[in-house]
Each structure stands twice: as structure tokens, then as C-alpha cells.
Amino acid sequence: MVDVVSSFWDRVDTALAERDTQGLRRSLKARSAETGILDLSNNDYLRLSQHPAVIAAGQQALAKWGASATASPLISGYTAVHAELEQKLAAWAGFECGLVWNSGYAANQSVLGRLPQKGDIVLADRLIHASMVEGVLRSGARLQRYRHLDVDHLAELLAQHADGERTVFVVTESVFSMDGDYPDLNAMAELKARYGFVWIVDEAHAVGWYGERGSGLVEETGVTVDVDVFVGTLGKGLGSMGAFTLFRKASLRDYLINFGGEFIYSTYLAPASAAAAIAAVDVAQSMSAERAQWRQRSREVRAAIAAPDGDSPILPVVIGDANATMRAAESLLGKGFKVGAVRPPTVPANSSRLRISLSTKLSDSDLTRLVESLEEAQS
């Protein structure tokens, strides 16, 4: 028995040593309220986590409801604040109804782990988030990946499964979290009209940045009526905490309430977070005039640092080597910029990168310094 236990600890130590050798070992670093550092590593693109109206709404709900929902949603954790948030989100994005979750990971795990079932086919963009992949694998459905953003490849796969004997799901992100690019949603909607499938779109990194009302790329491209499940987060562009799913048909909401373990068996999202998100939606809707400016700035910064074309808030600077990426991130931190250093397995091997998140609060002088500092960090 002692030898068996010892082999377990050896296995743990060996795995960590391998990560060290590869330059891939991760560790937690507590973030402080830094001064003099511009944080371009987080997903608070609109800086709504610091908006006075959002903070005030959270504080008022904290005083009224306390610091916790205190129970799972089917017991007593589901409050009037959560119901209001669901209704606001659904109306904002143009869906019939919604459901609030503790995290985006939980939402994707439940949606993709429960809706597809054994015998179904899930066609997914090759670079969808790990939470989506793991959900599909748990479902027992057959997962096939199409080449990243390749609508023609998706069409080929749909044609192969056009016999109508199995339910086909198509899964994509709108803005992809590591590359900041996005698919042709209109072309995908045309494929749905031709072949028929259940369409699930994760808008986590598009909410607040796209659309006249700010609800995302689904709104921007006018495909709302074609999307069956819209997944979004409250903790990125909306500056709060948690996630949400929106549904074209209310039966999907009811199904997940009854069968989604991630929803059923956890203490629910704090009412203060839900209240803050309600205020954040109101603020985001009021920013329609600024959205075109943010996207133009993204295009300009991309051109200056030779990042791929686009207008999303996510700018990847691919370096390749993991250790070189970490050194570049440290160099930028020394110059006053905190950026994400993303390594495998989050991204494919030899594609380690600096992940820069644009903020609506960045000044022209900040961006000029950033471009100069990036050049120095990679030299």
C-alpha cells in the first residue's frame, strides 16, 4: 500500500516537472490594486466593473439580499433579481427567454453536455473553447470539428449528414477568445436554412462590443432568429460575474432547469452580481455611438503591431516559444503594461502568444507607448 501511495506522489511530481521543462507550468499570482500599471490582460473591455452605476446597483442589492444567494436556484436561491436579469437579457438580445448561470464554463458544460445526446452529431469549429469541447464529449454525441472559420468545410460535413436520421448541432464562438477573429454568421445562417440544425453560438467575447444595442455579433449580423441557443457571460464585457443562456424556445430553458446538474446542484449566483449585470446592460445599451470608435481603434492598433486584421477587442501577438512569450510579458510589465501570456494547452503547440485586451479607457498616448513597448519586448 505504501508503494502505491508513493507512486501517486511521484506521478504528480513528474507531471509538474515536465511542465517546468516545457515552460508551461502555471501558478497563481494574487492581483493587487496596482497603480501605474495598465491591465490589458482581463476581459473587462468596457470597464463596466468600475462604472459607478454598476457598482451602486451591486451595493444596493448587497444591502438588500446579503452576500450570497444562500441556496441552489430550485430551493430558494432564485430571486426576483435573477428573474429581472433574465428578462432584461432576453429582451436586449431578442430571444424568447433566458437562464442565468454561475459561470460560462458551467453554462457550456450543461448546454453541450445535456442537449446533444448519444447518436447525435455535433459539428464544431476547431478552436471552440475547452468548456464546449468537454461538454460535447460528456454528452455521448459524435463530435466532428470543421476547420477554423471554414464555412465551406462545414457545408461539406452538413451535406454528409443530410439524411435526417440524426439531430445535427452546429457550435461556434462568435469572437474567438485567443485569436479575436469571428466566423461569417450570415453564411452559417444560410447553411441552417438549407440543411437544418440546432445552432449554438457562444457570444462571450462579443457582448458589449458589437451590435447597435451592444448584445453581440448575432445582433450585429441580423441572425438572431436563426440561433437556437445564445451563450454569454456577465463577467467580461458586462463587468459583473456569472453567465447566461438565451433560447429561441422556452422548452430548452425548462429542459435545462430540470436536467442541467450544473444549474441544479450549486448555490446560485449572488443577487448582487445579478443586480450589477442589470445595470451594466443599461450602460452598454447607451454606448451605441462609441462602439464604432472602439472597433476602429482595434483596426488601427492591429495594423501598428502587425496583428491579424479585425476589429474585436482581442489582439493576439503570436511569438511561438513559451519561454520567449513569458519573457516578453515580463518586459511589458516592466514598462507598465500587464498582458496575458497564453501557452499550450490553451493554444496549440508552438503558438504561445501575448493576448492583449483592448479597453475603452485607453488613451492615444497609452496605445503609442504600448506599440513601442511591444517592439522592444520582441527584439
Image: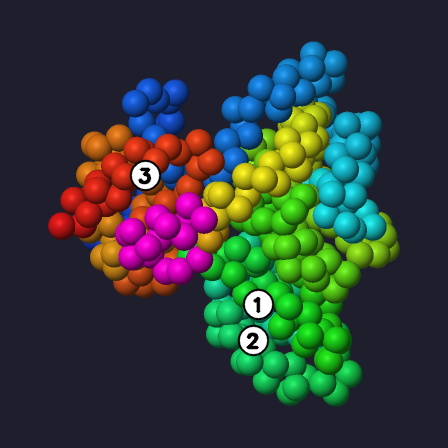
The image quadrant that residue 273 belongs to is top right
| Residue underneath mark 2 | 151
Task: Please state the horizontal and vertical placement of residue 294, each as a whole percent of the image.
Answer: 48, 43
Predominant secondary structure, magenta span? helix
Which tag is nearer the camera, tag 1 or tag 2? Answer: 1
Give x and y (percent) for residue 297: 42, 45
Q: Which residues are magenta?
A: 296-310
Q: Which residue is mark 1?
A: 184
Which residue has dot 3 on it?
367
Vertical side of 335 occupied by 54: above or below: above
* Element at label 1: loop
User: Which three-letter amino acid code belongs to the residue tagged 3?
Assistant: Leu
Classify 137 as above or below 292: below
Residue 206, can we see it? yes
Alpha carbon of mark 1 to alpha carbon of mark 2: how far?
A: 8 Å
Q: CA distance from mark 3 to mark 2?
A: 34 Å
Image x and y of residue 28, in percent: 36, 34
On screen, residue 230 versus residue 32, left or right, reads right
